[in-house]
Structure formats: structure tokens, C-alpha cells
Amino acid sequence: MKVLEGDYRHWEQMATPTAVTVGVYDGVHLGHQQVLRSLEAFGLPVVVATFRQHPIRVIAPEVAPPLLTTVERRVELLEEYGVAAAALIDFDESFRRLSAEEFVESVLVAKLQARRVAVGTGFRFGYRQLGDVALLRTLGARYGFAVDDVDILEEGVPVRSTVIRALLREGHVTAAARLLGRSFRLSGTVVPGDQRGRTIGFPTANLAVADELVVPGSGVYAVRVKWEGESRLGVVNVGNRPTFGGAESVIEA
């Protein structure tokens, strides 16, 4: 899979016309997967124009949501689902000030050669989010691409990253997995703990997770631990250590 990154003005133009979808694509959940499959039907290389960081972290960092996946994991998932190219947009102050038409002309048309564009029903874009799906269709007619807007439901529940984050924070990992299309995965660095577990025959791994990632609500969960190519069944405690009365918040498998 091709990855376009850095300043979009320096991206190499896609070699052929493409089918493009635009969004954060956090989690690459069932809704995202359905959009990708719908674009494959047009016989064009599928490109995901996404963001290295969530735009809200630039616009209003105090209310930025925790993420379901790191950008590295997002790229891995997109490749697994057959995407031809991921265009990682650096959403900074300069990019934020692009008008809706400038975004379409400079990114979708000039660099990605879009002939088909798929977005969510409530999609907004451009400076101050003045662009919407109706404007995108108008610009598409001018620049030569068709627009599809999609709204995905699973058993009557909207499949959106915000819904999945809420489910995870409440500890509903099975419901979250249904909307993700796979089990939720949390990655991090193993850090030293109290090392009590090894003295009673149950060694544990304490996981340090990046601040921007969502963590399931406090509780005890069945997990599959993957480390250095090995996979084992395990149990993880999220929250305070119940056995030793610790007040520190931990993720201990």
C-alpha cells in the first residue's frame, strides 16, 4: 500500500484516477469497512484521505476525544482491507485554513485524481467547516467526480467511532467489538510494576498506554496477549489493583 505523508503540496500525484473516502477513520470499524467495499465496486484504486492527528486536537484540544487506534495501527488496518493508498494529512493551522474548494482542488483533484468520493452523511470540511455534502456534490460536478454519502447502522445502532468509544469507556467491550468487526486491541509498552505476581505464580505485565488512546472502563477482562510473536490467553485488570488496595490506575495483564 502506498502512503502519502508530509506536506500535501509535495505529495506525488496518484498515477491513475481513484475512488477516495475522506475521514479520520479512527478504528477502521464496520462502517468504514462498508464504505471501502462500496468504493471497490467502481474498479478504481481506493484511497483513504485521513488525518495524522484528530482535527479536534488542533481546533479545540481541550475536548479532543481519545482514539481507538494509533495512526500506525490505522495504516495497518487500511492495508489489511485492501486500500491502495493512505493519504495522511497533517492537520495543522495552515491546512485548517484551506477553504472547502481549495481542499477539493488541491488535495482530491490535483493530488489524488478523485473520480468518486464517499463521505459520511454529516460530513463537513473546509475552513470553519463551511463545506457540506451538498457543496461537495456541486464541486464534484465542476471537477469531474461523483459523490456518495453513507450512514451505516448495525442492528439499529449507528456505527461511529464516538459510539464505540462510549461503549468501551462503559466497559461494553463485546458490543464495541461488534461495531469494530473485531476485538478491541490496546497496545503499549510493558513497564515495571510491583513484581508481586511472580511470587505467587502469576507473573503480570503492566501496560503503559499513550495518553491519546481510549482505555476500557474499570473492570476485569478476558484477553489474548500478543508479545514477540507469541499469543496467550490471559486476564487484564483495568483500574485500581484490587488485591493489594492500590490507588494507582493500572492496566495489568
Image (spheres, rainbow, N blue to C red):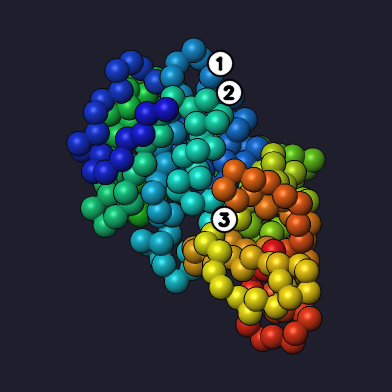
Question: How crowded is the residue under tag 1: few (<14 C-alpha within 10 Å), some, or many (20+)?
Answer: few
Measuring 69% from the left and 74% from the top, which residue is drawn there? Answer: 239
Task: Give yes or no for contact between labels 2 and 3 (Cβ–Cβ under 8 Å).
Answer: no
Q: Amino acid at mark 2?
A: Ser
Quadrant position of the N terminus in the picture: top left
Measuring 27% from the left and 29% from the top, which residue is drawn there? Answer: 111
Alpha carbon of mark 3 to alpha carbon of mark 1: how far? 34 Å
Q: Earlier in the sequence, mark 3 or mark 1?
A: 1
- The image shows residue 195 at horizontal and vertical percentages of 65, 76
- The image shows residue 117 at horizontal and vertical percentages of 45, 28
Q: Earlier in the sequence, mark 2 or mark 3?
A: 2
Q: Does 36 sit above or below residue 31?
A: above
Which dot marks residue 38?
Answer: 2
Residue at which label 3 appears: 187
Residue at which label 1 appears: 41
Q: Does 158 sit above or below residue 170?
A: above
Circle 3 SS class: loop
Task: Give yes or no for contact between labels 3 and 1 (Cβ–Cβ under 8 Å).
Answer: no
Residues 116 and 30: in front is 30
Which dot marks residue 152?
Answer: none
Measuring 59% from the left and 43% from the top, which residue is drawn there? Answer: 229
Alpha carbon of mark 2 to alpha carbon of mark 3: how far? 30 Å
